[in-house]
């Protein structure tokens, strides 16, 4: 049986498994209880649409060239695109203001 990905695949799977539940909880953490279902649904829909669009962009970047050299260059462009997208998302996330709780308990 061939190589199934090695340690990199294990780390990606572990990272996704640990981060997605926390991100889902964070997305609805400030919602009132009667809005949890709607907030969770909007979050999951945005995640699914974003994933589909992301895969579409990655396929466009990789393209359909048959040359191995071109494929390596295209995968380098793919990694640059993914890195730029991650940095951009992080910068946008840092700019989001937190809503202060007015309950005064703490």
Image (cartoon, rainbow, N blue to C red):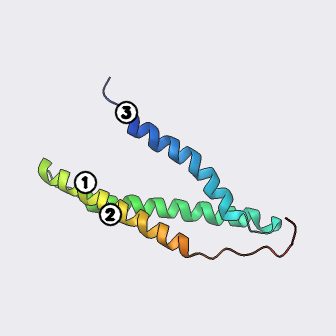
> Which quarter of the figure has residue 60?
bottom left
Q: Which residue is mark 2?
A: 81
Residue at mark 2 to residue at mark 1: CA–CA distance: 10 Å
Indicate the secondary structure of the residue bearing disc 2.
Answer: helix
Q: Position of residue 95 (x, y in %)?
A: 55, 76
**Residue 19, image x, y percentages:** 57, 51
Hey, which residue is sitting farthest front in the picture?
Answer: 106
Dot 2 crowding, Cα within 10 Å, few <14, some 14–19, many 20+: some
Q: Position of residue 24 (x, y in %)?
A: 64, 57
Q: Name the quadrant of the N terminus.
A: top left
Secondary structure at badge 3 equals helix
N-terminal of the two: label 1 or label 3? 3
Residue 33 in the figure: left or right of residue 50: right
Quadrant holding the C terminus: bottom right
Residue matched to label 1: 75
Q: How many marks?
A: 3
Q: Residue at x 82, y 64 (%)?
A: 33
5 up-or-down from 61: above or below: above
Q: Residue furthest top?
A: 1
Left or right: 16, with 68 as reference point: right
Looking at the image, which residue is at 54% across and 71% down? Answer: 94
| Picture residue at 43% right of the left edge, 70% below the top | 88
Contact, CB < 8 Å: mark 1 with mark 3?
no
């Amino acid at each position: 049986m061939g190589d199934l990905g090695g340690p990199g695949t294990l780390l990606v799977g572990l990272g996704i498994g640990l981060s997605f539940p926390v991100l889902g909880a964070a997305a609805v953490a400030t919602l009132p209880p009667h809005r949890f279902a709607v907030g969770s649904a909007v979050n999951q829909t945005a995640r699914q649409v974003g994933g589909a669009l992301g895969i579409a962009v990655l396929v466009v970047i990789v393209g359909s060239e048959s040359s191995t050299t071109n494929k390596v260059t295209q995968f380098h462009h793919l990694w640059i695109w993914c890195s730029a997208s991650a940095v951009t998302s992080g910068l946008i996330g840092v700019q989001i203001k937190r809503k202060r709780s007015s309950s005064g308990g703490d």
